[in-house]
């Protein structure tokens, strides 16, 4: 029960890594708001863990503000933990052929969302004198793969933002870390691969020394540690959960 009596907001919590984090946090004693654009999916996961569902578009200021207000009403203040997990990618293609609409969506969901949630949650965390923020970045931000250039760039932005936030917010008692998952069995896998075939999977797995994709449980276990009091001396790290891919 490492998160006993803690409150948490997890964006993109209806599926994939986010759902894994929600389940782990709840199992460790946290009260969780499952925030996702997919309301029905959020309600399903929230019902499973006795949490609360919140529909949110993390790229939209008004929607993020509404989520923050709902969290304040639910928890009686800001959450102890904020997990910025919601993310999207574009289909693999040469960097000069990615459409502007795809570029804007990737940067809005993966990067602007971190800015927007900081705007609405950090002031109250500062006033309280404590808080934990976890950004779900990617190995793509450390060791970019061809044909995913602007997704790679958005995750590199998240890693740098994590370090900048950590340095600035440490005196206020707020820790900020990131996790860098390698590709996993999530709804985004098919978009990363371009086509989900045995050949494409084998090609990708050949780059992971441990020889398997990551799982939501892998990411959730690391997230739980970084967001728990056990990690009270850890801030500004971007932990690679990648089976050795970035070595």
Image (cartoon, rainbow, N blue to C red):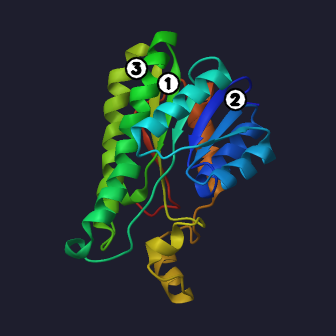
Q: Residue at x 39, y 73 (%)?
A: 91
- Sort mark 2 into few (<14), some (14-19) or many (20+) by Cα contacts within 10 Å: many
> Which mark sits nearer the N-terminus, 3 or 1?
3
From the image, which quarter does the N terminus lie in? top right
Front-most of residues 85 and 228: 85
Q: Is the residue 167 above or below the residue 242 in the image?
A: above
Q: For the image shown, how many numbered marks are present on the structure? A: 3
> Which mark sits nearer the N-terminus, 3 or 2?
2
Asked which secondary structure carries label 2, the reply is loop
Q: Residue at x 60, y 50 (%)?
A: 18
Give the distance between the C-alpha atoms of the residues marked 3 and 1, in whole angstroms: 10 Å
**Label 2, on which residue?**
3
Q: Give residue 73's quadrant in the image.
A: top right
Give the label on residue 102, or none. none
Front-most of residues 209 and 89: 89
From the image, which quarter does the C terminus lie in? bottom left
> Which mark sits nearer the N-terminus, 2 or 1?
2
Q: Is the residue 37 above or below the residue 117 in the image?
A: below
Q: Give residue 61's quadrant in the image.
A: top left
Residue 6: x percent and y percent?
A: 67, 25
Give the label on residue 170, or none. 3
Give the distance between the C-alpha atoms of the residues marked 3 and 2, in whole angstroms: 21 Å
**Label 1, on which residue?**
233
- Sort mark 1 into few (<14), some (14-19) or many (20+) by Cα contacts within 10 Å: few
Of tags 3 and 1, the one toward the viewer is 3
Residue 239: x percent and y percent?
A: 47, 45
Can you see residue 214? yes
Q: Is the residue 2 above or below the residue 238 in the image?
A: above
Quick check: marks 2 and 1 in contact, CB under 8 Å?
Answer: no
């Amino acid at each position: 029960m490492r998160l006993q009596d803690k409150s948490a907001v997890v964006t993109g919590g209806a599926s994939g890594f986010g759902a894994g984090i929600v389940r782990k946090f709840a199992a460790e004693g946290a009260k969780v708001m499952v925030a996702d654009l997919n309301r029905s999916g959020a309600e399903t996961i929230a019902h499973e863990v006795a949490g609360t569902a919140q529909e949110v578009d993390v790229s939209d200021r008004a929607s993020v503000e509404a989520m923050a207000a709902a969290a304040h009403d639910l928890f009686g203040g800001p959450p102890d933990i904020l997990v910025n997990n919601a993310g999207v990618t574009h289909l693999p293609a040469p960097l000069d052929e990615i459409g502007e609409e795809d570029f804007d969506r990737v940067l809005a969901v993966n990067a602007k969302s971190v800015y927007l949630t900081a705007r609405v949650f950090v002031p109250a965390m500062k006033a309280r004198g404590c808080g934990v923020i976890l950004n779900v970045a990617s190995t793509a931000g450390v060791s970019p793969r061809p044909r995913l250039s602007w997704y790679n760039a958005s995750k590199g932005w998240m890693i740098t933002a994590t370090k900048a936030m950590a340095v600035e917010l440490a005196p206020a008692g707020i820790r900020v870390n990131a996790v860098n998952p390698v590709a996993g069995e999530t709804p985004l896998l098919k978009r990363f691969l371009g086509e989900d075939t045995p050949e494409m999977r084998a090609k990708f797995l050949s780059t992971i020394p441990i020889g398997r994709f990551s799982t939501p449980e892998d990411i959730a276990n690391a997230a739980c540690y970084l967001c728990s009091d056990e990690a009270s001396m850890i801030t500004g790290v971007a932990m690679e959960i990648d089976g050795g891919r970035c070595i």
